[in-house]
Image: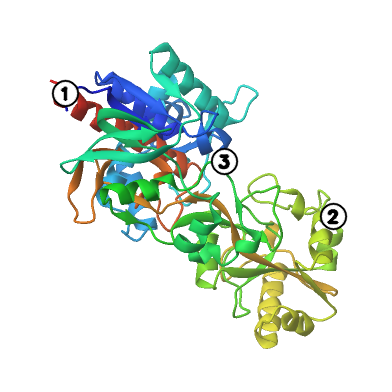
Amino acid sequence: MSEIDFDVIVVGSGAAGLIAALTAQERGADVLVVEASATVGGASRLSHGHILASETHVQKALGLEDDKDQLYLEYMLANQWQIKPTIARSIADESGPVIDWLATLGLDFVPALHRDGGERVPRTHMVDGKGNVGGARLIDVLQRSCRQRGIDIVTGNRVDRLIHRDGAVVGVSAGGEDLTAHAVVLATGGFGANKELVVEHLPSVGQHQEWLYYIGPDTSQGDHIALADDVGAHLVGHDVCKPSLAPRMKVVDFDPFIPAWSLLLGSDGHRIIDETAPYGQIYGVTRQSGGVVHAVFDAATLAINDTPELPTFAHGGRPAYWSTDGIKDILGSGGGVEAATLEELAEKLSLSPTAVVGAVARYNSFSETGVDSDFGKEARFLRPVAAGPFYGIPLVTSVIGITAYGVEIDGGAQVLADDSRAIPGLYAAGECTGGVIGTRYLGGGNGLASATTMGRVAGASAGTYAVAARA
């Protein structure tokens, strides 16, 4: 090609895309960002702005000692080594530096950390929203940095095709116009807003399609799937996502946690987990239970649900549907059942009466002694299920936070083809990649950790490649 329009074209303007653009420019590349939506930010803008990271200035200021090698190991163990080690290594190694780099751009973090998963030390860093949502503040800072550095962001232009020549990607087609580049970074986001793709590629969640709710923008349509087909890119991560539990109803107010006082029974009628466990772990056992579990409680618990007497959540706030009125609405709309006896409750939930009666009796004994001999739930959350009427609410994995079916990448964020070769000139980061987020969500901020770290890696790789190709 005799003339190139840009060194690097980034497709998508979420955290992964904007960070890739800024990083590629730091490597000396001339960069353009193309965004399908009229608004910059994608799903990142709508997020809480929580980022999982290790060895950061925030941790050090709080006197916390952490180890990126430990983060790497925990990431691999939680996902049973189903994540490519080089990718987990990149996330672990870059997580601390990317937090510190974001701070140099003017992004502030709350001087406190959460531990929302099974991590050894608190690693969930929270963006200080300055009166706004953390994710919006993150995008605003990144967009301002792009503007200050002369990186153009073209909105309202959906890339519909990758231009390739002799096995290499050399540009994109958007709005009927071809734009050429030495390298392209895909950061198009996921496909949670595309019910057809969810049903096809995330069947464990898609089976609940009547109640599907995606925490993200309408533009998350899975553009990367068609673009990958253009160039023979390999797609991985079938049926992998970050879902959460919700009643069988149209959710409009969402939180990933469930009431700490609930008793969760699986499809066999037996208790399955400490009900205050991290949400990423609850999803795993729910999947083993066929994608549905049952929250069981009694009238006495419902009567004091909205009072300080009942510690409702182990991890903070709650959505409206777990208020007393919300629960009554669920029951009234057929999303739950009421019964005079446990045997009747089991029948209405299509569970084994013997199993349910036994599970409740055992749980009540834990409530009486204050010691959960099975799962170790704290005594203050052991609320008995003692006297009717009894209630049961089936909970299904119908809420999608992150889709994780996407293009396969290597540790340098270069996209791999169906024949396992690295595709020259094509890189990817964020929710459009597969094999980065695993079947076990490590903790709060795992999604943005992937987007920020791999965005940084993709930008560095693409920028270095493009500058060398230009020379």
Q: Return the mark for residue 325.
A: 2
Decide which of 144, 449 is in the foreground and name it: 144
Alpha-carbon span between mark 1 and mark 2: 67 Å
Q: In this orientation, which residue lies closer to the viewer: 359 or 26?
A: 26
Cβ–Cβ under 8 Å for marks 2 and 3: no
Look at the numbered disc 2 and give the secondary structure of its residue. Answer: helix
Residue lying at 24% horizontally and 18% vertically, measured from the top left: 28
Residue at (79, 83) in percent of width and height: 344
Callout 1 secondary element:
loop
**Residue visible at 38% across and 23% down?**
101
Q: Nearer the viewer, residue 85 or 186?
A: 186
Q: Amino acid at mark 2?
A: Asp
User: Mark 3: which amino acid?
Assistant: Pro
Which residue is label 3 attached to?
A: 217
Q: Quadrant of residue 457?
A: top left
- Mark 1 or 2, closer to the camera: 1
In the displayed orientation, state which residue is furthest to the front. 176
Q: Quadrant of the C terminus?
A: top left
List the residue tagged with mark 1. Answer: 2
Specify which label sits upstream in the sequence, 1 or 3.
1
In the rendered view, does 456 fall on the left or right side of 166? right
Question: Of circles 2 and 3, which is in front?
Answer: 3
In the picture, measured across the screen, residue 437 lies left or right of residue 3, that is right
